[in-house]
Amino acid sequence: MSDFFKPISGMELPRFAGMPSFMRLPNMDFDHARIDDVHIGLIGVPWDSGTTNRPGPRHGPRQLRDASTMIRAQNGATRVRPFDLVNCADLGDVGPNPADIPDSMDRITAFYDRLKPHGITPLTAGGDHLTSLPVLRSLAKDAPVGMVHFDSHTDLYHSYFGGTMYTHGTPFRRAVEEGLLDPKRVVQIGIRGSTYDDEDTDFAESVGIRVIRIEEFFARGLQDVMAEAREIVGQEPTYVSYDIDFVDPTFAPGTGTPEVGGPNSFDALEVVRALDGLDIIGADLVEVSPPFDASGNTAFLGVSIMFELLCVMARHIAK
Amino acid sequence: MSDFFKPISGMELPRFAGMPSFMRLPNMDFDHARIDDVHIGLIGVPWDSGTTNRPGPRHGPRQLRDASTMIRAQNGATRVRPFDLVNCADLGDVGPNPADIPDSMDRITAFYDRLKPHGITPLTAGGDHLTSLPVLRSLAKDAPVGMVHFDSHTDLYHSYFGGTMYTHGTPFRRAVEEGLLDPKRVVQIGIRGSTYDDEDTDFAESVGIRVIRIEEFFARGLQDVMAEAREIVGQEPTYVSYDIDFVDPTFAPGTGTPEVGGPNSFDALEVVRALDGLDIIGADLVEVSPPFDASGNTAFLGVSIMFELLCVMARHIAK
Amino acid sequence: MSDFFKPISGMELPRFAGMPSFMRLPNMDFDHARIDDVHIGLIGVPWDSGTTNRPGPRHGPRQLRDASTMIRAQNGATRVRPFDLVNCADLGDVGPNPADIPDSMDRITAFYDRLKPHGITPLTAGGDHLTSLPVLRSLAKDAPVGMVHFDSHTDLYHSYFGGTMYTHGTPFRRAVEEGLLDPKRVVQIGIRGSTYDDEDTDFAESVGIRVIRIEEFFARGLQDVMAEAREIVGQEPTYVSYDIDFVDPTFAPGTGTPEVGGPNSFDALEVVRALDGLDIIGADLVEVSPPFDASGNTAFLGVSIMFELLCVMARHIAK
Amino acid sequence: MSDFFKPISGMELPRFAGMPSFMRLPNMDFDHARIDDVHIGLIGVPWDSGTTNRPGPRHGPRQLRDASTMIRAQNGATRVRPFDLVNCADLGDVGPNPADIPDSMDRITAFYDRLKPHGITPLTAGGDHLTSLPVLRSLAKDAPVGMVHFDSHTDLYHSYFGGTMYTHGTPFRRAVEEGLLDPKRVVQIGIRGSTYDDEDTDFAESVGIRVIRIEEFFARGLQDVMAEAREIVGQEPTYVSYDIDFVDPTFAPGTGTPEVGGPNSFDALEVVRALDGLDIIGADLVEVSPPFDASGNTAFLGVSIMFELLCVMARHIAK
Amino acid sequence: MSDFFKPISGMELPRFAGMPSFMRLPNMDFDHARIDDVHIGLIGVPWDSGTTNRPGPRHGPRQLRDASTMIRAQNGATRVRPFDLVNCADLGDVGPNPADIPDSMDRITAFYDRLKPHGITPLTAGGDHLTSLPVLRSLAKDAPVGMVHFDSHTDLYHSYFGGTMYTHGTPFRRAVEEGLLDPKRVVQIGIRGSTYDDEDTDFAESVGIRVIRIEEFFARGLQDVMAEAREIVGQEPTYVSYDIDFVDPTFAPGTGTPEVGGPNSFDALEVVRALDGLDIIGADLVEVSPPFDASGNTAFLGVSIMFELLCVMARHIAK
Amino acid sequence: MSDFFKPISGMELPRFAGMPSFMRLPNMDFDHARIDDVHIGLIGVPWDSGTTNRPGPRHGPRQLRDASTMIRAQNGATRVRPFDLVNCADLGDVGPNPADIPDSMDRITAFYDRLKPHGITPLTAGGDHLTSLPVLRSLAKDAPVGMVHFDSHTDLYHSYFGGTMYTHGTPFRRAVEEGLLDPKRVVQIGIRGSTYDDEDTDFAESVGIRVIRIEEFFARGLQDVMAEAREIVGQEPTYVSYDIDFVDPTFAPGTGTPEVGGPNSFDALEVVRALDGLDIIGADLVEVSPPFDASGNTAFLGVSIMFELLCVMARHIAK
C-alpha cells in the first residue's frame, strides 16, 4: 500500500499545522482518481435541524476534524494500525439545507448512495441524531440491519409538538417503521435520565429492541453487557450509532441534551473495542455540539471514539 | 395607576433574586384578569429555525429576561419613567415548533393576533430575524406599515440553497411581497460586511427602500442619519426591527452572523432615543444568541436597547 | 389530581421556552388560592454572605431554575413520577439582605415559618451553606431533628477571623448548640481535602456526630455506607443537606470551596436514591456558584440531585 | 536612588515569571527596613461584602497584581518614568473579614492609619466601592478632601433593603455626612444607566456635588470636561476614586454592576492623564470582579489605569 | 476566468460546512496543475517560538481559516470583488520546527522562495511577528522594500534576555540590519503602551523610520495619517505587516502582548482601505493567538482585515 | 520549630487575600538569612519551549501558586501535617529564556546546583516535561537515580522534526543516555493514547524501563501496581516526575497533549500516597497549561498533587 493514504506524522509536521482533514487523511471527492481505492470514508454531516432542544451539532464535523489532528497512527490499547490495514479518506461534508428537513434528508441519502458503487464503508461525524435515518435509508436500502446504539436516550419516540415526525428524538422509530432496522437485532446501551413516560420503551419492548439502562450497565459490568450486545447483533450486517451523550456530560459537555450519571471516558472507548469482530457496515458519532464545548474536550473524546470505531472497522475489512 | 404593574426595586429585592420576568414586570397570559389594562406587552419568541449560519437565538428570550432584571425604573439619559406612563407586562413566550418552520410561523402570527382585541402594543424579544415576518403578518394585516430597521444585513434576499424562501435572510423581501411593508417608508441602517452580490440592494433600490451603509452612518453622523430616518417613516404607523448585529460584534458578540466595524454601545442606545415621537406600532430585538455570548454582555446590551424602545413607545402611547 | 400542578412537557413546549420556574412547576406565593394544596414547595435562597472564600451562590437559585427545565416527569432509574404522587410548586425566592447577615437569617426563618400552617415540606435551593441554619431554626423549632449531610467539609467549625460565629463553615456547630440537630442522629458523608486541624472532627466525636470520610466511602462502597446512614437517622424526622461540593469538582466545578477526589455524578444520584423510606422533613441543595460554572453543568447536576430528593420526598409523603 | 525599588525588566525576566507583586515592585510590610523610603504604596483591599449585586471584587487585588506584570517602566504617552521619580512598593493586602462589614471597615482604616507616619501616599486596588469609605476615614481624618470620581453610578444613595447604611451604593453619602469629603470640591464623571429615581442626584445637588453624565461627557468632549473637573477640585488635597464600571462594559466586563454606553479604553486612560498637576493624596481603582472577567482584560485595563494614576501621583510628589 | 478559483457561496453550501480553507479558496501545493495561474497565495505560518510573553500564534492559521469561511465574495464598503479580479488560492501552511528557531526561519524563507518562479504574491497568516523576518528574507532578497507597519509595538529592539537576537520583538531591527527594509520608506502606526525605554524609538529615529504613536493617530485623524503613510512608502515595492495588537484588545483580545487604548474595528479596516493604489509585494497578519481568543472574535476580525488586504492587493495586480 | 515557616491560616486571612506564594509559604531567595533552615524548596520553572504541540506551561507556576492558597495545613486522608514536620519555603521561579532552549536548560541546572549546599530537596512546578532533564542534570550529577513517572506518554522518543533532540517528548531518553537515570529503576505508569509507533517502548524494553499501560493499571488495581512500582525503585534515591496528563483530561483539561481514558482525581492523589516511605530526592509536577484551563481546576488538582508529594517527602525527611 502506498503512502498516499497515510496521515502525516506529528513528528514531521506539528499537529497544529496543516489543513485539518479527519485524522490528517487525504481529502477527496467522488471524482478523485483514487476513489475506488478507498475502503473507509470519513464523512461529515453538519446538520442539526432535527434538534428540539439546544442546537449546535451543525458545527460538529469542523470541530471534530480540528481535534482529530491529535490522533496518531497506532491504537495504543489494541496496537491496531488502521491506516496500514485499509485505505481511509476524508470524503468531505454533505451539504445540508438548514432550513428544510426533508430536502436535507434527501441530500444525505443521495450522498451515501454514491458510496456503494465504490465499495466504501462510511464512518460519519454528525450532526444531530436525525442524521442516522437518511444514512440508514441508503445503507439498509436492500435489507434491514442490526444496530448497536450507545446513547442516554432511546430516540424511539413517535412524534413531537403535536405530530412532527422527524426530530432527533424519533430516528429509530422511523427506521423500524421503514424496515431499515431489524428490531430484534437492535440493542440500546446507556439509557438514563428523567423521561417523559414509557412510550419509547413500550415501543421497544413491543418490537423486540433490547434496552440496557445505565444502572444495569454499571451493575453487570461493561464486558458482560457488551458480550450480550455482540450476541444480539450476531454476525449479520450491523450499524453502530454512537451518540456522544452516552458518555457522562462531565466528560462530554458539548452536547444538546445531556443526562448526568453516565460512563467515563475509559468506558467510552472500551465499549467500542468490545465490538471487534462484528460485521460493521457503517458507523456514526453524533450530537457533538461545539457551542457547548468551550474547551474542545468533547470533540477530542469524539474523535478518540471515532478512531476506535475506525480500528474495529479496519480490522474487519482487512480480514 | 396601581402598583400592580410596577417592577420591584433592586433596593428592596436584590437583582439576582426572584423569577426573571422581563424587567421584573408581572407575568400574565391572555386569561389574566388585568389583561385589558396592559398597554405594552413584552413577548419572547424563542425560535431560530430560519438561521442559515450559527444557531442559538432560540435561547434569546430566557437570557434576555435574566439580564433584564438589571434594568431600573428610570431612563438615566431621557429621564422617562415608562412604568409610570403606561402599564407593561411580560406576556410570556410563543411556543414554537423547532422542527417545522411554517407551523412555527402560524403559531407566532396567531399569538400576535390576540393582542389587538386587548389594545396591546408588542415589544418582542427574538428569536432570529425570520421572527419579524409572522409578527408583521399580524400587525400589518390591514395595511402596510413603515419600518426603521437597524442591522448589518438587509435581509432582503430572494432565497437560499436553491429556492428556500423562509430563512433569516429573507423576511423583509417576503414582507414587501406580501404587502406588509410599504417599501417607500422603510429605512435600513448600519448595513456592512462582505456580501454575496448586489441582489438585495438592487431589490431595495427597485422598490424604494432606503439603505444607509455604515460608512455613510459614520460619515454623516448619527443625528443627521436619524433625522432622515424619521422623515422617511413620517407620522404613519411604523414598525421598528432591531437586529443586535447592527452593533459591532465586540459590543454584541452573542449573535450568529456578526460583521465587524459597527457602532458602539452608546450609539446603539442613541439611535433608539432618536425615534422619539414616531407612531411605533410594534418593535423587536432579534438575533441575540446566548451560546455565543459567554459573558452575557450581549443580552444586557439587548435589554438596554429594549428599555430604550420601551421608553419611546411608552411616551408615544401616554401622549 | 388536576393538571394545575403538572409541569408542561418538552414535547409540547420546547425546554428552552417559557419562564423558568423550578421544574416548570406553577409559581405561587402564600396568597395563592391553591397554596393549601401544595405538598412540596421548592424555594430559592439567593444568599451567600456567609461565604469566606469564593462567592457566588447568591446566583444559584436562578441558574438552578434555568437548568431545571431539562427535567422531565419520570425518574428513569426508579420510575417514580413525583408530580403524579404529590402537588409541587415553586414558592419563589426568599429575599435576603446581602449586606446584613443577621437580618437575612431572620428573613429566611420567617419565610419557612409560613410553610407549616399550609403543611408544605420544603426543598431548598441555596445559597451558601449558612442557609441551612435559619431553615433549621424554623423546621426544628419544636424538637431536634436528625440529618444526612453530604459534603466535603464538616461545617462544624467554631468561628472564623477571630470570633465570627456565622459563616458557611459553622452552620451545624451552631445548629447543635441551638438544639436544632440531635448530633447522635447526624451523619456526614464525603468529608475530604486538606484541613486546618482536627477542631471540627474533635467536636463531632465529642457530641456523637458520625463522620464518614471519602476514603471510607470508596473502600466500603456506596450501598454499605448508605445503609449505615439510614440506620443512624432511623425513622425519626430527618433533614437532608446536600452541599454540591460533595461531588468531585470536575463534575461540579461551580462551587466556592472545591476539594478534589470526590464521587462522580452517578454516585451523586445514587446516594439520594438510597434515602428512600426516610422521614424527610426538608432538604436543601447548596453552594452552587454560577460564576464558577461557565458551562452550567453544575447547575444541571444540582437539579438532577434535587429531582432525586423530590422523588424520595414525594414517595414518603404519598404513602 | 538605588535599584531596590526598580521593577525587574521583562527583557531580563519574562513577564510570566516570578511572584506577581504590583508592577513587579518590592513587596514589603511596615516592619521592613526601608519602609520610610517609600513614597507611594500600592495596597490591595480584597473585600466585597458591601456588594448588593453580583459579587467578586474580593478577588480583584490578586488578578490585578497578575495583570500588572505586563506594565513596563515608562509611560509611552507621557514619557513619565514613575519608578525613576519616586520609590514605590507593594504593601500587600489588608486582611478583611468577609462576614463582618464593620469589622472589615475598622481593619481597613487601621491599615491606612499606619501610612501617614511613614509619609506614604496610597494607591489602592479594591475591592468594591465601599472600600473608599474606610480609606477616606483615614486619609481625611483631619480635614475634608476634594474628589474626582469616575463611575457610572453616583454611589450617593441613602440606604438599601430598608435601612442598610453601608453598601457599595452608599460610600460617598456617608463620606459627606462624616465630613470626609467637601462636596463643593467633588465631581462625578460618567454617570449613566437606568436609575431607581432622583434621590441620589437630588442629594448631590443639595450639597453641591457636580454630576457630569455621560451624555454631557461625550457632547462636550473629554478635555473640556476634565478642565472643569480640575477647576472644581483646585489645588487643595484631592482623592481620586476610579470605579472600573466608568468604562464601557465591553472594555471592562469584569465588574458587578455594568452600565452600557460608556467611554472606551483610550478615554479611560486620557481622563487620568488630565489629572496631572493636582494634589492627589490618594487614589483607588475599585470594582474589578475577576469571576466576570474570563479573559482577564478588565484587570489589564485596570492596572493600565493604575499605572496612569501612579504616573500623575509620582510627578506631583517628585516636584 | 473559470470557476475553479471562486469560493463556493454560503447560499449554496452553509458557511459551517466543508473543509475550512482560507476564504473557501482551492487548497493547492506547488505541484498542483494550476499553480501558475495563481496570482495571490494565502499562506499560514503556524509558529510562535519567538514569543517572549504569552504564547499561542502557532494556532493562528487554523483558527483564521475557520473564521474565514464567513467571508463572502464582495467587499461591502469598496464593492471590490477580488475573486473576480485575480486568481487566489490557499497554499497551505509552512511546516515549522517548534523547538528550533533558526531551522524554522530557514523553512519559511525556503517556502517563500518557491513563490517567485510562479509569480505569486503572498498574503500570510502568522504566527508571531518574528514570522515577518524570514518572509522578508525571501521577498526582499534582491532589494530593500518599504513597509507600512500597523502595531502597538515597534518590534525594533536589539535583543532580549542578555543577547537573544531573534524574538518577536526584534524582527524589523534585524530586517533593517540585513538590508531587507529601506528604513526611510518604513512607517509604523499605532505605537502605544508602557515601554522599557527609548532604545527602539532612538533606533527608529537614527535610521529614519517614521513612528506614529496612537495619540498622534487619534489627534490627526485616520485619513490624514494614512495620507502621510502613503507618501512615505511611495510607489515603490512595499510590504504590509499588520500585527493584530494594533487594534484595541477589546476588539482583538486574542493576542499575546496587548496594549489598551487602540483603534476600534472600523478603523482597523479603514487603514487597510487607505492603502489602495500602493505596490504591495506581500502582506501579513500576525499575532492572532487562539488560546486567548475564547469567542473567536479576534480571528474573525483578523480575516476581515485579511480580506481588505486581499482587495487592495487584487486591485493592484489586476490593473 | 518557629512559626516563620508556617503558612497563615485561611481562618485568619481569607484565602483570596495576600500574595500567592506556594501554599502561603515564605518566599525567599538564596541570600535569605534562613535559607539553611529550609528542608524542602518549592520552585517554579515557567518554561515551555520544548513543547511540540499546544503551548502554555510557561504560565503554570503562577497559576499553581494562585490555586495553592486553597491548601490547608493538614492532609485530610493521611493526617500528615508537613509544615510541622519540616521547613518549607517558596524559592521563587527559575528565570528561563523563552527563545533559547540550551540557555534555558543551563539556567535551570545552575539554579538547582545551588540547592545542594543548603541541603534543600526540590519540589518543582513546571513548565513542560523537558524541565525534568536539566533538573536531573543537577540532582543526578553524581550517580543515576531511579524514577517513578506518572504520565500518559513515555517521553522516551529519540528526536522530532528530523533530528531535534530536546523537546518535551524526549527528556527521559536523554536522561538515560546521559546516565542520569538508572533505567532498571524506572517505572512509567498510565501510558495510553494513540501512538506514532513502538520506537519509545522498544527503547524502554531494551534498557529495562518498566512501562505500565493504563489498561494494566485499571485491570490490576492501583494498590497492586503501586506495590510493584515501589519494588522497582526500592530504597535507593528516587525522583518522582508527575505529568498532569497522567490524569484524565476531564479532570485536568489544562494541558497541551491530553489523552482520554485516564485515572480520576481520587486515583491521582492515591498514587502519590502510595509512594510513602521511598527515598525521594526530588519531585516535579509538570505540563499544567493555564491557557487551556479556563476554570482553574487543573491547577487546583495540580497543587493538590503537589501537597501529597510534599507530605510523603516531609515524612521521609523528618524520619
Image (cartoon, coloured by chain):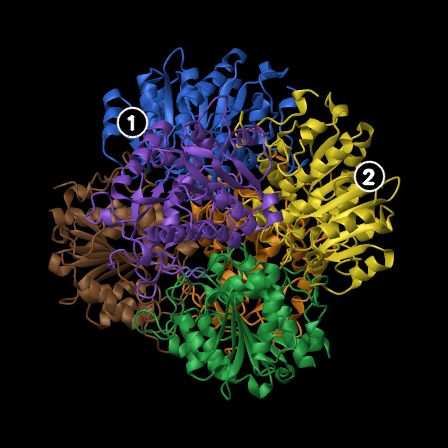
Chain colours: A green, B brown, C purple, D blue, E orange, F yellow
Secondary element under disc 1, as helix, strand or loop, is loop
Q: Chain of mark 1?
A: D
Can you tell which quarter of the image residue F213 is in?
A: bottom right
* Drawn side of residue D47 relative to residue B108, left or right: right
Quick check: can you spot residue B274? Answer: no
Q: With respect to residue D171, does A159 lie above or below?
A: below
- The quadrant of the picture occupied by the N terminus of chain C is bottom left
Name which residue type carries label 2. Ser
Q: Pointer 2: residues within 10 angstroms few (<14), some, or many (20+)?
A: some
Q: Where does residue A55 sit, x and y in percent of width and height?
A: 42, 63
Residue count near mark 1 (Cα–Cα under 10 Å), binned few <14, some 14–19, many ≥20:
some
Across and down, in percent, residue E35 comes to: 62, 74
Q: Residue B246: give x, y in percent of width and height.
A: 34, 55
Disc 2 versus disc 1: distance between alpha carbons? 63 Å
Q: Nearer the viewer, residue F169 or D67?
A: F169
Pick whichever, F72 or F19, lies toward us: F72
Residue matched to label 1 = D159
Left or right, B244 with respect to F282, comes to: left
C301 and E272: which is toward the camera: C301
Q: Identify the disc placed on residue B172.
A: none
Residue bearing mark 2 = F138
- Secondary structure of the residue carrying tag 2 is helix
Q: Chain of mark 2?
A: F
Q: How many marks?
A: 2
- Asked if badges 2 and 1 are on one and the same chain, I answer no
Identify which amino acid the numbered label 1 is placed on: Ser
Residue C267 x, y percent position in the rendering: 53, 52
